[in-house]
Amino acid sequence: MKLRYTLDPVDLVNHKLHVTLEVTSSGDGSQMDFVMPVWTPGSYLVREFARNVRQVTARGGESQELPVTKVAKNRWRVGKGAGETVTFSYVVYGHDLSCEGVDVTPEHVYVNGAPTFCYVEGAQAEPADVVIQPPPGWKVVTELEEVGRNPPRFRARNFDELVDTPIDIGHGTEITFAAHGVPHRLLLCGDGGNFSPHRLEEDVGKIVSATYRLFGELPMDHYTFFYHLGDAWDGGLEHLSSTSIVFPHYTFRPEKDYQHVLSVSCHEYFHLFNVKRIRPEGLGPFDYGRENYTRMLWAMEGLTDYYTYLLLRRSGLHSVKRWASGLGKRLKRYQETPGRNVQSLEEASFDSWIDHYRPYEESRNSSISYYLKGDLVSLCLDLEIRHRSHNDRSLDDVMRHLWREFGKKDRGIPEGGWQKEAEAATDLDLGRFFDRYVRGTDEIDFHQFLRYAGLSLESAEEPDTGEGEPPSVPGYLGVEWVREGDRPKVRVVLEGGPGRRAGLTPGDEILALNNTRVTHETLPEMLARFSPGETVDVTFFRRARLRSLPVTLGKAPPARILVKPVPKPSDLEKAIFEGWLEAAWTDLAGTPSEPKGSA
């Protein structure tokens, strides 16, 4: 069977992309099913891409019109004619500049595979050509193999590669560099942008080199970072030899925004190994018509987050102090998520399809992010391995083992097999650790694990007032709110908090405390006038009815969690710290060895 797709952005102003799929077969069979994926790998949510498909037609040889019947939400059945060729045509509406979308505008066309290409049922393993009809003067950038230039023509080895290889058509700014023998390309798509080409090239090169040092090789022949400049952050999505990242035009300054660009870039680049090649059995080959379940997403995404921060540190892009500050912020977020006591990492991974991408008012109380907890559990696992092996083994050894045994051999890790492979790489029994923190919901003693590297944790309240008095401790409702006009509207009521115990509920519009009016802006100031343990009358609207409840205020969580060095680390603790972060022990202590300008 021969497959050839043609992409023609027929109506840029109205965001329409015309797609044809020409299928040449042996002529066997009386019908053929064309199927649109319902999700895209790397984003574990059923997105129903068929909703953007219109004007579906089919023709046979000599332009014979063929009958088309829609038999499911994403499936069209075509009755074959007498000839060997069927041409299936449709229009995709694309006005979605996101990592998972299709965007067709007068300035730029971005094509993701899953929301663009139907497949022929039973032919997913067949190679396919893709012909592009770009507007005059526009260039086409993709990691697909180029097989023709007029018009641009590319080839995918199978449908998985077609879905996993974005196509950009436009006038992007291209920056190229070679790292460890592999060509890399940064394509900045969109007008404006306050980036420095030289600095961006240099910093992304450091990320590439840090990843190379971990694994000792790179798994592809060339790579593209698609940077899409828009009006909002949308994160990134990994692909086999590229990544798509969407962020605002002017996000390269100030520095904290630029650091976020680097963090997302590092995360997606690490996916070259972890997820795209080191993967669970359930994540490839893919079933594009339904959910693809695995209990190992924590090890694919959370662990990738862990290595994101670690590699930024090892590359020198983050100082030890910036790394420690970031860890403190993540620990604070974790401690303020009651769902950590309810849902395990394996459960969070399995339920991603109905949970992670669809948070609602009770999510914080009933679930935990496999990104956040997966990152912190990976950190603890790394320190556990280093401590118990007397700094002879680490999580780095586990990743290299998984790369050799699974990634390079294109084998999926069996469900439940990640622990076994970690034990094989380290010669350690890790059953108790996994029972408690991966399969279970035991509270994690971060003090213990960080002490293995000579680190301690300290809670910090608000800064001193400067008047010789300790900072006052404000009252705490245990709710989060959003603006509704000028009123604070309760969005989340945290499990175990004062508001939950008193009976506040999401949707309540708070009007007053002790009969004194509050607004969205003044509620924090008003709470600061009460102390933990005091009872206040909270007046609010609930579903348009005026209500009042007495609430006994609690004590707010610490404003910050600080990661600090212990005063007298042992030789082993110091060695673990230095080997782990690739930094001198004195760097965190704030001695003159701290580089100028670091944060």
Image (cartoon, rainbow, N blue to C red):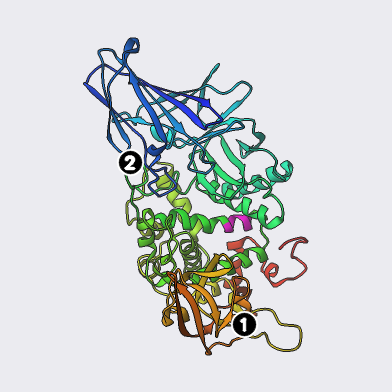
The residue under label 1 is which amino acid type? Ala
Q: Earlier in the sequence, mark 2 or mark 1?
A: 2
Q: What residue is rendered at 51% in x and 71% in y?
A: 480
The residue under label 2 is which amino acid type? Asp
Q: Nearer the viewer, residue 103 or 543?
A: 543
* Region in magenta: 309-314
Q: Residue 310: say if magenta.
A: yes
Check the image and report above or below for 247 versus 465: above
Q: Residues within 10 Å of mark 2 (few under 14, many from 20)?
A: some
Indicate the quadrant where residue 192 lies: top right
Depth-wise, is mark 2 or mark 1 nearer the camera?
A: 1
- Apparent side of residue 175 relative to residue 331 in the rendered image (left or right): right
Residue 248 appears in the picture as rendered: yes
Question: Residue lying furthest front in this view?
Answer: 545
Q: What residue is rendered at 68% in x and 42% in y?
A: 201
Check the image and report above or below for 480 versus 33: below
Q: Position of residue 21 (x, y in %)?
A: 39, 23
- Apparent side of residue 178 relative to residue 445 in the rendered image (left or right): right
Q: Main secondary structure of the magenta part?
A: helix
Q: What residue is rendered at 32% in x and 41% in y?
A: 289
Residue 569 appears in the picture as rendered: no
Q: Nearer the viewer, residue 128 or 411?
A: 128
Residue 528 is marked as 1
Query: Secondary structure beneath disc 1?
Result: loop
Residue bearing the label numbered 2: 287
Query: Secondary structure beneath disc 2?
Result: loop
